[in-house]
Image (cartoon, grey):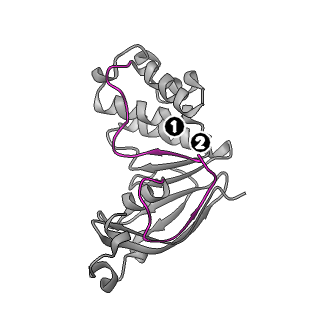
Amino acid sequence: MTLLSVQGLAVARGGLRTVEGVSFTLDPGQALILRGPNGIGKTTLLRAIAGLQRPVAGRIDMADDAVAYAAHADGVKGALTVAENLSFWARVFGGGGMDTALSAMDLVPLADRPAAALSAGQKRRLGLARLLVARRPLWVLDEPTVSLDTASVLRFAAMVRGHLAGGGAALIATHIDLGLDAQVLDLTAFRAKADRAARPAGFNEAFA
């Protein structure tokens, strides 16, 4: 069973196409690493797959409520404790596994600390632990290791491997080697042609 099918996808940022003709599939247990130079459109592509903006062209097929998305913002509520943040997201997503999430990213000693008092790295660990309580089969991750130290990167990589072993899939934009058995897709080959990227955008491209 394919968890994600992307066919002929084109996306735009600021009304201009960035990449086009992107096609791939992800089955249970598979990970795909997105690579490419800064500004090529990795974030824009991930946002389109996560349903946060409309693609210019192409098709995205996956089950409803399949995606858990983690981007540059950690998505934590400063007034809540670490445990309360995870409990909140578990209720939103209808998931669970609080203890597993706390342990996976070494948050047990911080469970009662307000999120506002966390360091940048600790907030990132909390944001990533949220993936486990969401219990969605497809993880779409944009530079997830930003602000993480080496030990936390290793913990996160182990978390991803566990997700894949359990039948999930992951699409990750990262320049870090996470030691995963993953396919790599370099978006450089899909950069929008100059005539398409530079022309005045149509309505759909300008407001995607």
Q: Residue at x 52, y 24 (%)?
A: 103
Report x, y in % for residue 86. Answer: 48, 25
Which residue is the extreme one toward the front?
203
Q: In this view, does 120 lie to the left or right of 143?
A: left
Q: Does residue 178 show up?
A: no
With respect to residue 189, does 27 lie above or below? above
Label 1 and label 2: CA atoms lie apart by 8 Å
Q: Is residue 114 left or right of residue 20?
A: left
Q: Which residue is drawn at 35% across and 36% down?
A: 149
Q: In the structure shown, which secondary structural element does the residue marked by tag 1 occupy?
A: helix
| Span shown in magenta | 51-80
Q: Which residue carries the number 1 mark?
A: 131
Q: Does residue 76 show up?
A: yes
Report x, y in % for residue 69. Answer: 47, 46
With respect to residue 66, does 208 lie above or below? below
Report x, y in % for residue 204. Answer: 38, 70
Q: In this view, does 29 lie to the left or right of 23?
A: right
Residue type of the residue flagged with mark 1: Leu
The mark found on residue 136 in the picture is 2
Mark 1 vs 2: CB contact within 8 A: yes
